[in-house]
Amino acid sequence: MIGALAIQKELEELGSEPPCVKTVHNILARHGLIAPIPASQSVREVIDRHYPALTITRPGQVQQLDLIGPRYLQGSSQKYYC
């Protein structure tokens, strides 16, 4: 939105009260002067694409682990992850 923001600031400097930046951007997009803002993806589309579901047929088939670390024992420089 650099273009819309620049136009809004220029209008302010000329002494006029410009519309908000989003309105200026929409006007520019409507007249084909810039590409329209792409529609954002839904959270479900992103999750389905990046995290495919596993087929679970029995209990205990899938387990989850959260790692914590690094942790250091007193007097040692060895890294430990739990």
Image: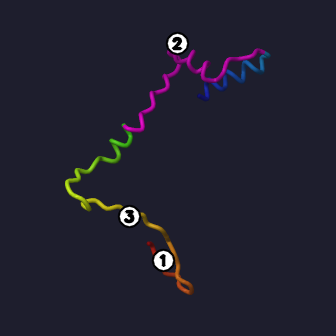
SS class, disc 1: strand
The amino acid type found where label 1 is placed reads Lys
Residue range (magenta): 16-44
| Outermost right residue | 15
Tell us which disc is closer to us: 3 or 1: 3
Q: Please give left or right for residue 51 compared with residue 66 in the image.
A: left
- Quarter of the image where the N terminus is located: top right
In the image, 57 versus 46, the foreground residue is: 57
Residue 61's x, y, as percent?
Answer: 24, 60
Q: N-terminal of the two: label 2 or label 3? A: 2
User: Residue at coordinates 69% horizontally, 22% vertically from top-left?
Assistant: 8
Q: Which amino acid lies under the numbered mark 2 shown in the image of this protein?
A: His
In front of the other: 80 or 56 = 56
Q: Are marks 2 and 3 in contact (CB under 8 Å)?
A: no
Query: Does 13 sit left or right of 40 as displayed?
Result: right
Percent of width and height locating residue 82: 44, 72
Three-letter residue code for mark 3: Leu
The image's mark for residue 20 is none
Relative to 44, say whether 56 is above or below: below
Element type at marker 3?
Answer: loop
Q: Which residue is mark 3?
A: 65
Q: How is the image coloured?
A: rainbow
Q: Residues within 10 Å of mark 2 (few under 14, many from 20)?
A: few
Point 75% across, 20% down: residue: 12
Cα separation, mark 2 vs mark 3, equals: 52 Å
Identify the residue under disc 2: 31
Q: Nearer the viewer, mark 2 or mark 3?
A: 3
Q: Is residue 12 left or right of residue 74?
A: right
The CA span between labels 1 and 2 is 59 Å
Residue at image location 79% in from the left, 16% down from the top: 15
